Amino acid sequence: MPFATARHPLPQDILCVIEVADSSLDYDRTTKQRIYAAAGIPQYTLINLVDRGIEVRRAPDSAHGAYTSTEQVSSNGAVVFQLGDGAVLAVPATDLLP
């Protein structure tokens, strides 16, 4: 049975979670990042519509529900996604921001 129909993805199946935040910005920066870090999601990317920037969190500390690395990506930068096979994908921030 294909993965998509067999079960919902588990944390170990997920390389990155992307949130788009406007009115939920504070909630996404606090509560959601703790949930994702505690689950061991390797990368949490927050597209901040309020400030037109992107926040990339990596290296989760599951025991403390926090990420140990945070990068601010400006509108002229790029977001780097670590792929499961060790490759990387760089996406210009302008492609992610409205």
Image (cartoon, rainbow, N blue to C red):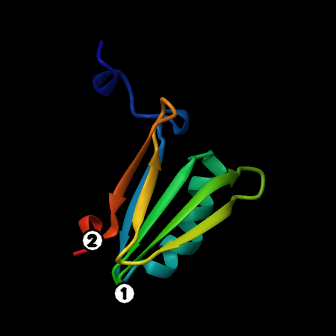
Q: Residue furthest front?
A: 76
Q: Quadrant of residue 98?
A: bottom left
> Residue placed at 40% from the left, 71% from the top?
77
Locate residue 39, reporting x and y percent. 61, 46
Look at the numbered disc 1 and give the secondary structure of its residue.
loop
> Residue placed at 29% from the left, 17% from the top?
2
Q: How many residues crowd mark 2 within 10 Å: few (<14), some (14–19), many (20+)?
A: some
Locate residue 56, reporting x and y percent. 51, 64
Q: Separation of disc 1 and disc 2 at Cα?
A: 15 Å
Q: Residue furthest top?
A: 1
**Nearer to us in this view, 90 or 23:** 90
- Taking the image as shown, residue 23 lies to the left or right of residue 85, namely left
**Nearer to us in this view, 55 or 22:** 55
> Residue placed at 48% from the left, 29% from the top?
85
Determine which residue is flagged by label 1. 50
For the N terminus, the image quarter is: top left
Q: Quadrant of residue 78?
A: bottom left
Locate residue 68, reporting x and y percent. 71, 61
Q: Residue furthest right?
A: 63
Locate residue 29, reporting x and y percent. 54, 73
Q: Amino acid at mark 1?
A: Val
Where 16 sits versus 27, above or below? above
Q: Amino acid at mark 2?
A: Thr
Q: Which mark is residue 94?
A: 2
- Taking the image as shown, residue 36 lies to the left or right of residue 96, namely right
